[in-house]
Image (cartoon, rainbow, N blue to C red):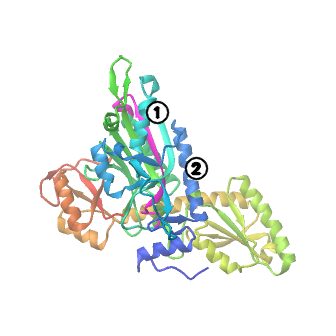
Amino acid sequence: MSKGLTSRTEDYSQWYNELVSKADLAEHSSVKGCMVIKPYGYAIWEKMQAVLDQKFKDTGHSNAYFPLFIPKSFFSKEASHVDGFATECAVVTHYRLKNDGNGNIIVDETAKLEEELIVRPTSETIIWNTYKGWIQSYRDLPILVNQWANVVRWEMRTRLFLRTTEFLWQEGHTAHATQAEAIAETEQMLNVYADFAENWMAVPVLRGKKTANERFAGALDTYCIEALMQDGKALQAGTSHFLGQNFAKAFDVKFTNREGKIEHVWASSWGVSTRLIGALIMAHSDDFGLVLPPKMAPIQVVIVPIYKGEEELEKISATAQQIMSDLKAKGISVKYDNRDTQRPGFKFAEYEMKGVPLRIAIGGRDLENNTVELARRDTRSKETVSNQGLAHLIENLLTEIQQNIFDKALLNRAEKSTRVDTYEDFKKVLDSKAGFVYAHWDGTPETETKIKEETKATIRCIPLDNPLENGFCIYTGKPSTQRVVFARAY
């Protein structure tokens, strides 16, 4: 393994970039702004996909797939939607290349598309154009569809996993007969995301609504889960949008209700992306590498033999195979690393960098004593334990590690959450402590914009469980009935 990482306290951004590289998660592509997700990074995404996909199916959703290309005219049908994505759209104008006779490959100007195509930044428009043919009656509703896909948003400043020109995600798109059903769907999926973030990723999140300035283009309401990273910056980890009838009206999607009246359909959309891997990295990891909660770790346990000669290795391998069998029977993913090309110390550093939750080392003395050495990644503690009941012990330890990682992230959030009553204190906290800042706001987009321009802090959300509390806006001094959550964010 290469040498250690830049300290988080020294340069958090550099630490993050080095960690993504050294933990073998991803690398920059030769296509500017795009990334190559390497097998270990993709394995984490597959774990996320598997859990979320089952949650979607458990709540009645089915997977489908829609085209990557969207006719440009579709975007102009929903004005606020096109305004929200106009600066990020990649446009396809031609469909053929040719050789100019001098060995150069050029665009064939005779092969211009009749209508330009947008490479999808999100799929509401193509999906609602499709739904028009699927929906005639209330009997056709609800439609509960999800797709796993890639999207393209032409970002100016990119960072692996957090913001790339092309990224992977899922996007749910549902159609309903009533406003109440669409809102219930929007809230349900927010709770699905929050449950996943907290109970699988071990990342505590705030559940809330976005302000009008921050909501999704074309939505009436955007619900979100907001996570706090170790450096005190916020990360939007998932969004669920109540779209009202905006897209149904734009694409003329109507249905005959139970009373025989014709109405426009009600809609929701919701999504999370590979930025969740960035959240996982920044919420838990340390200066020695990744720290993965067991439920998200591609390898939960690794076994490393420490041996002298082939005969001792064979005996250790027999013990290792039995341990592996016992662990697999409990649904625990385990790897036995008996490579003879690397020394044990190299392997220890490698799996520490990759965030494997538990490491088992077995040496000659362990064989004699019927023991193994167990090392925890979260606490970096080691102990020698008996082979007797080892699988049961490891099963319990993985549960304990999962909880410990969550508790540590929760403590970080608590320590970096501050209530302020003046604009001066607001700015001081942002510059010295960072984190979530709870402050009164007068409710106007103008004030929100001014605060953002002056401090680079945005309103992350208005928490769903927000208590009413009379106060005065930190910026204008106007009356306010509740605090909102500000932070600088990724």
Q: Left or right of 76: which side holds 310? A: right
Camera-side residue: 9 or 50? 50
Q: Which residue is drawn at 31% across and 38% down?
A: 246
Q: Quadrant of residue 420?
A: bottom left
Q: Name the residue under label 2.
A: 50
Q: Which residue is drawn at 39% across and 70% down?
A: 231
Asked whether 48 falls inside the magenta stretch, the response is: no
- State if disc 1 and disc 2 touch (CB < 8 Å): no
Q: In which quarter of the image is the N terminus?
A: bottom right
Foreground label between 2 and 1:
1
Q: Can residue 380 be seen in this view?
A: no
* Highlighted magenta segment, given as a residue range: 160-181
Camera-side residue: 112 or 287? 112
Q: In which quarter of the image is residue 186?
A: top left
User: What crowding class fits label 2: few (fewer than 14 Cα within 10 Å), some (14-19), or many (20 or more)?
Assistant: few
Label 1 secondary element: strand
Q: Quadrant of residue 427?
A: bottom left
Q: Mark 1 points at which residue?
A: 143
Residue 69, x across and y down, in percent: 45, 48
